[in-house]
Image (cartoon, helix red, strand yellow):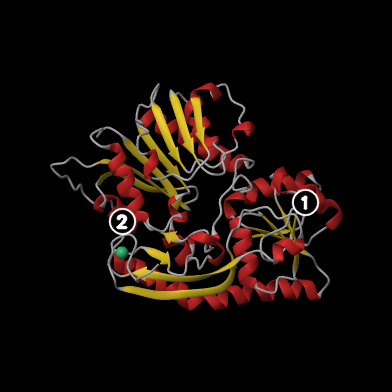
Amino acid sequence: MIAETCPACAGTDLRHFHKETGVPSHSCLLLASQVEAARFPQGTIDLAFCRSCGFITNTAFDQGLNQYSTQYEETQAFSPTFQAFATELAGAWVEKYDLYGRCVLEIGCGKGEFLVAMCEEGAGQGIGIDPGVRPERIDSPAADRLTWIQDLYSERYSFLAADAIVCRHTLEHIQPVADLLRDIRRSIGHRLDTVVLFELPDVLRVLREVAFWDVYYEHCSYFSAGSLARLFRSTGFDVLDIRLDYDDQYLLIEARPSHPSGSVGEAFPIEEEVAVLEAAVDHFEQGYRETVDRWRDELEALQSTGGRSVIWGAGSKGVAFLSALGDAETIEYAVDINPYKHGMYMAGTGQKIVAPTFLKEYEPELVVVMNPVYVDEIAGSLRALDLAPRLVAV
Ligand SMILES: [Zn+2]
């Protein structure tokens, strides 16, 4: 950022509260060797909280360090838990907003699974935009109703008219958040029936749980229900619904363009005041060091008795967890169920990514699960392998 202004509300009262240097600039890029992983570009995280609207942003974020491409392996679709959640949500949105036979545009569609699900659930046509989309991986009876654009969304795609604009786990990767929403609002023009459906992580939980593994370079923007709803309203939208889902980790917001005559709508109970968010910022700031040290001590204690630990989940949370621990020699391997990741290395800290079956020979005593929502799924996989290590979720 050139000046210290809030990208959501343009306010200038920003409070810096968290800084980390030497953070891998990407968490989901696959690296073919440990050397490449260690040489991976690094950036600085310098989080600031806007006292006017509650938005949190990485003021040291350098867009140039983020190269999204088809090498990007963010998909969570290999997890039955995540897949069940996404399929249910796709169906629920098609039904709730009567998108049967209608057109859905997805900004930041990733590998496209969600858009495919919406079309399979009844949407008539889907357009997905993402620099990392891999159409050749898509195998669906709805494939002929889908169009893929391998690019970042920008104003030049504003000609794409749709009945619904979906954007999941993307807004947190974009710093000029108000600009993006204004672009979307402009692209909708007078089609006031268009529904806008976003999903992203909830920062209030991250702050309250001191979930340092949920703070990483790719995420330059952090929202709570309050700050997200305020942004939508200030950029020309009426909020139809805002709620938490997925074990209360994700925020879902559903909106429509506000009528030109102006309709503000009542705030939802979930929309907290800025002061509530600031108290959570205090809590994170005070608890960060202690929380990181507690994890490091536990892993070192196990190692000193000859025990082995692995993390399960080689995505962004895993990279953030290992890089915050710094000297991560206590962990040699990261387990993941995505076969496209096996044999590759974690950005920055360089752990090798292995399939669950590898644990048969490695026999870890401790498995650190990078997301509590997957504990049952992982416990089942370990039982199937006849293994019974201690399972601890972050
Ligand atoms: Zn602000």
- Asked if labels 1 and 2 touch by Cβ distance under 8 angstroms, the answer is no
Q: Nearer the viewer, residue 299 or 383?
A: 299
Q: Which mark is residue 391?
A: none
Q: Position of residue 356 (x, y in %)?
A: 76, 49
Disc 1 residue: CB within 8 Å of ligand 1: no
| Residue type, numbered disc 1 | Gly
Q: Position of residue 189 (x, y in %)?
A: 25, 37
Say which residue appears at 45% left-offset and 23% top-offset. Answer: 122
Classify the position of ligand 1 by quadrant: top left, top right, bottom left or bottom right.
Answer: bottom left
| Quadrant in the picture for the N terminus | bottom left
Residue that sits furthest to the front in the current view: 156
Q: Is residue 25 left or right of residue 30?
A: left
Q: Is residue 22 left or right of residue 235?
A: right
Secondary structure, mark 1, is loop
In the figure, residue 198 lies in which quadrant?
top left
Say which residue appears at 50% left-offset and 27% top-offset. Answer: 146
Q: Position of residue 167 (x, y in %)?
A: 43, 43
Say which residue appears at 70% left-offset and 44% top-offset. Answer: 340
Say which residue appears at 79% left-offset and 60% top-offset. Answer: 364
10 Å crowding of disc 1: few (<14), some (14-19), many (20+): some
Disc 2 residue: CB within 8 Å of ligand 1: no
Q: Nearer the viewer, residue 65 or 371?
A: 65
In the figure, residue 188 lies in which quadrant?
top left
Q: Which mark is residue 271?
A: 2
| Quadrant in the picture for the C terminus | bottom right
Residue under label 1, please give it: 343
Q: Position of residue 90 (x, y in %)?
A: 46, 34
| Residue type, numbered disc 2 | Glu
Secondary structure, mark 2, is loop
**Nearer-N-terminus badge (2/1):** 2
Q: Is residue 177 above or below residue 164?
A: below
Q: CA distance from mark 2 to mark 1?
A: 43 Å
